[in-house]
Image (cartoon, coloured by chain):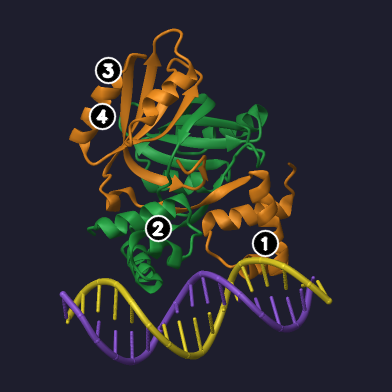
Chain colours: A orange, B green, C purple, D yellow
Amino acid sequence: MRLNDLDERIVHALAEDARRSYADIGAQVGLSAPAVKRRVDRLLAAGAITGFTVRVDPAALGWETEALVELYCRHNTSPEDIRRGLSRYPEVASASTVTGEADAIVQVFASDVRHFERVLERIAGEQFVERTKSVLVLSPLLRRYTSGSPT
Amino acid sequence: MRLNDLDERIVHALAEDARRSYADIGAQVGLSAPAVKRRVDRLLAAGAITGFTVRVDPAALGWETEALVELYCRHNTSPEDIRRGLSRYPEVASASTVTGEADAIVQVFASDVRHFERVLERIAGEQFVERTKSVLVLSPLLRRYTSGSPT
DNA sequence: CCTGAAATTTGACTGAG
DNA sequence: CTCAGTCAAATTTCAGG
């Protein structure tokens, strides 16, 4: 699906605040409210917008510690093996396979450093994991878009 | 702020679909629509919920290339300097200061590798940046929730 | 794009714990 | 005094023309 400039501006407006009214967004991009709604519906149907969600302060939910973990996996580990293995951890917020030395990078939220240590030990103990390398997040500077599914 | 069980269930419902009506959420958690709204307003005021946003399929928006960039900055660079510098790039989805050798890790979405290369060159040219180190994302395995501010 | 009906959001008021 | 429920007014959504 091709997105034109108008669609991009609408997505950008929704990314900033998904609860703005269609009339409001229309005034910004130069369209009527129904026209904006039609485009949003089209973006939803096409899968460009996959849903609406809240931005949450992890600390308020008790997730004070954020870390990025590089995973070095055994040979013959498929991305699907990694996904399946990690999906069982509620502490895992996101994970991707990457180029470079590591096989995957995993974003983990934990209640504190001790909690993170326990999660890391369990992940490092997975059959497909050879070793890990972690950095702790000090302060989040920017956080703009969300992608993916509501799982 | 402490969240009780009811607040957590409301946040969870909104994380799945932020467009559900208060009445709908209320039916699920056992409250009336206005009661749910009062709690959401309180969570917003307290900063536990920092906003509402859309979940986006980057590929459908034409952002086919995702990369993680480690930033090594000059001495005396404050987190705020980094944040201000990076916020001018629409391609930057998230950024955090981290422990370890690098000073910050930046998540970048670009339309293709050539586009990413141009963005990387511009970021590497920022006054506060000494050098960078990047990995490209091969496939996103998991992507669960969003945190942070709408800036 | 405009209009009218339906649904939702939102505030005020009232009562229970 | 805090928190939830009910009711009514104002917006917003959404289907017609």
Q: Is residue A9 visible?
A: yes
For label 1, the crowd category at 10 Å Cα-Cα, with few meaning under 14, some 14 to 19 and many 20 or more, is some
Q: Is residue A17 left or right of residue A40?
A: left
Q: Secondary structure at mark 3?
A: loop
Task: Name the residue that disc number 4 marks.
Answer: A119
Inter-mark Cα distance, 3 to 4:
10 Å
For label 4, the crowd category at 10 Å Cα-Cα, with few meaning under 14, some 14 to 19 and many 20 or more, is some
Q: Secondary structure at mark 1?
A: helix
Inter-mark Cα distance, 4 to 2:
27 Å
Residue B50, disc = 2
Q: On the image, which quarter does residue A20 sit in?
A: bottom right
- Is disc 1 on the same chain as disc 3? yes
- Is disc 1 on the same chain as disc 2? no
Q: Is residue B122 left or right of residue C13?
A: right
Mark toward the viewer: 4 or 2: 4
Task: Name the residue that disc number 3 marks.
Answer: A125
The kind of residue tagged 2 is: Thr
The kind of residue tagged 1 is: Lys
Inter-mark Cα distance, 2 to 1:
24 Å
The kind of residue tagged 4 is: Val
